[in-house]
Image (spheres, grey):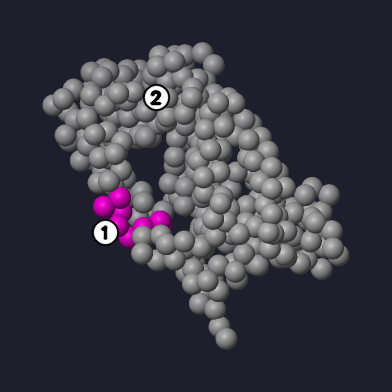
Amino acid sequence: MTEFSILDDNTSWQKDFERRLLASYTAAGLDAAAAERLLEDVRADTGAWTIAEITDAGMRVGYVAVVVADNHGALAGRIGDLHVDAPHAGRGHEQAARKWAEQWCAERGARRLNIRLTEPAGELFDGYGVRGQLRTRRIGSPPEPLAGVTARPMTEAEYPHWLASEKSAYVGDIVRSGALGPEEAVRKSDRDFADLIPQGLATPDNTFLVLEVAGERIGTGWLKHRHLPGVTYGYSLHIQEQHRGKGYGRAAMAAGERATLEAGDSVLMFTVWGGNEVAMNLYTSAGYRVMEESRSLSLPRPTG
């Protein structure tokens, strides 16, 4: 029988959790410095988590970590970790831990439960909607230009229209994923762009591209270099709708990969929002693996 006991001392769990997390980051292509930087961000949050030991007949078989906190004015729960040791996997402990976490968060007022997966979970979270994925790929040598696509720096005259279009697309991605409502998404978009590129085209360590074929503009790109040590983050590689379906999406990624190497980085990272299966399929075909996947579930109000 699966049972749960809240830990007073989280030291053993913390070491095991960080070991597993580092292993997943390095498997995704990050070097030690980048993986450690990501781990630092996660470590800063874990102090607020409640850690439960999963046991079977008194034997520890895994851990589950949960927390409930305010999220844009509403309480939301989070499963920070759910792990069953390999010798005990597949015996129902995972399902019991998921149900325990859902109930624990619901009892504390959470109406939504989020989880960030860093390793395959099989069918365990199939009922949770995919909100987004973080994809990565280590780049070896500069790719050749594809489909006749060339990339040039964006001009000051082109920047305002690009910015308005990117902010609108970002709002649409957030709403489509189910993460926020329209008004909250607009506020988040305004905040995020103001924080990320306060100096516009002059913001350091950013590359803004215009993608062209035979002199005709077909899309744009925005990349942030040294997002992590050795890692460029691709905020946007966008192909205009009338030019889609011609292989330009993969060509745009090749342009981003060249810009990544030219900036001295060796890994390119993207976020793809839930509901955008076209982009997910493109990233998969181009060799970008899922490093993290965010999912969420609406929780019922507890009864009794």
**Secondary structure type for disc 1:** helix
Instruction: Judge from the rendering whether residue 277 lies leftward or rightward of residue 212; answer left or right.
Output: right
The quarter of the image holding the C terminus is: bottom right
- Residue 251 on image: x %, y %: 40, 24
In this rendered view, identify the residue nearer to me: 262 or 73: 73
Circle 2 residues within 10 Å: few <14, some 14–19, many ≥20: many
Q: Residue at x 13, y 26 (%)?
A: 157
> In terms of secondary structure, where does tag 2 sit?
strand
Tell me which secondary structure the magenta stretch mostly adopts: helix
Rendering coords of residue 214 (x, y %): 26, 17
**Quadrant of the drawing holding the N terminus:** bottom right
Q: Quadrant of residue 28?
A: top right
Residue at figure coordinates x 73%, y 59% from the top left = 53
118 sits to left or right of 158: right
Residue type beneath disc 1: Glu
Can see residue 187? Answer: yes
Q: Which mark is residue 183?
A: 1
- Which region of the structure is painted magenta? 178-188
Quadrant housing residue 244 = top left
Q: Can you tell which mark lies on residue 225?
A: 2
Name the amino acid, label 2: His
Determine the residue located farthest toward the bottom in the rendered image.
Answer: 304
Question: Which label number is shown at residue 211?
Answer: none
Q: Is residue 180 magenta?
A: yes
| Image position, residue 128 (x, y; %) | 55, 59
Residue 3 belongs to magenta span: no
Mark 1, other Cα within 10 Å: few <14 / some 14–19 / many ≥20: few
Q: Earlier in the sequence, mark 2 or mark 1?
A: 1
Image position of 90 with respect to 143: above or below: below
x, y percent for residue 149: 34, 20
